[in-house]
Amino acid sequence: MRYREFKIVEADAGETDPDNPTPGEFSDISSAKDANQQQMISSEALTAGPPYPREEMDAVKALQTKLEELGYNVGNTGIDGKYGPRTTRAVRAFKRDYNIAGDGLTADAATLQKLDSVISGATPRVERPTTIAPGSDGLEYPISNSRIESIIRDEAELRGIDPDIAVRIFRAEGRSSYQSTVPRTGRGSLNGREASFGPYQLYIGGGLGNEYQDQTGRDLTQDNTEDGITNQIRFALDAAVRQSWQPWYGRGPAGVGRYDGLRGAKQARNWS
């Protein structure tokens, strides 16, 4: 108590006690805290999901708001706080327009600071923001998830596989993007991400993806079309009939046993 009294007596004119602000000082202190918080947000890197951490949603919303203000579309879900494929495309387009290295999977400090600089007018805006077409960056599918699930159900029924189980594996594997968003370098990677592709994340680092490419003559990195996706689903479901769901890591989180929904199923061999 004495120390506080000493501080008050010795304070120079114009200094304030943060524990006992005078009227009118609350707003100044609040503004300072908000500014500090904004500065922290602006200096922290944000990374594409999934997952979409709750503690990052406000920062992602701020990112999405700025991107939209500058003409970069973050998708029909709008400002939702989820750094998904559409926001990834918007970040990638922004980086391309302002000569920032890297893809759209990370909004690093340089990107966030440049955003603020453009918003404030310190950096001139580009006249025509780049638009990246869905599917062209290897992340977003060119068709909807509901369409993909419809294809999966039809192909699963054709083989005698439980369609609900087949859809659960898809949702745990490749629902969020065509190429995996799991960061990875070296063997089994492409553009800094794991080299797994499509609804069933066929892996070309020594997995089913290599078998798919060898047997079909297709390149999974260029197969992100409705025809390619349908072919991958057919191949993957035949593989599940032969091998069970064991090759798919997502079966664990999805709560699917190795042979769930597969008993009595037969291959259709309708992929090419």
Image: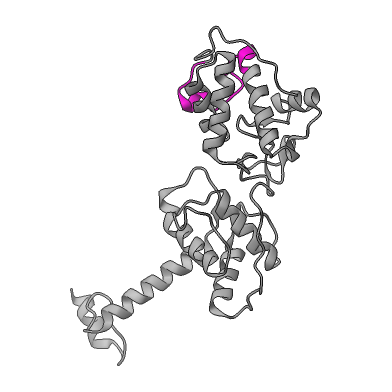
Vertical relation: 86 (above or below) 158: below
Q: Judge from the rendering whether residue 184 lies leftward or rightward of residue 170; answer left or right.
A: right
**Which image quadrant for residue 99?**
bottom right
Closer-to-camera residue (239/270): 270
| Image: magenta residue range | 240-257
Closer-to-camera residue (104/187): 104
Q: Does the magenta stretch include residue 256?
A: yes
Q: Residue furthest bottom?
A: 13
Say how the picture is coloured: one colour
Q: Can residue 26 be seen in this view?
A: yes
**Which image quadrant for residue 140?**
top right
Q: Is residue 17 visible?
A: no
**Residue at the spot x=37%, y=71% of the render?**
33
Q: Position of residue 167 (x, y in %)?
A: 51, 27
Image quadrant containing the N terminus:
bottom left
Vertical relation: 115 (above or below) 143: below
Q: Residue furthest left?
A: 1
Vertical relation: 135 (above or below) 236: below
Q: Position of residue 219 (x, y in %)?
A: 78, 35
Q: Which residue lies furthest to the top in this view?
A: 264
Closer-to-camera residue (117/217): 217
Total tally of numbered discs in the picture: 0
Q: Position of residue 38 (x, y in %)?
A: 44, 68
**Which image quadrant for residue 188?**
top right
Q: Judge from the rendering whether residue 99 lies leftward or rightward of residue 10; answer left or right.
A: right
**Residue at the spot x=78%, y=25% of the render?**
216
**Residue at the spot x=36%, y=76% of the render?**
31
Image quadrant containing the C terminus:
top right
Q: Position of residue 92 (x, y in %)?
A: 64, 57
Q: Judge from the rendering whether residue 255 lies leftward or rightward of residue 221; answer left or right.
A: left
Q: Is residue 225 magenta?
A: no
**Residue at the spot x=71%, y=28% of the render?**
209
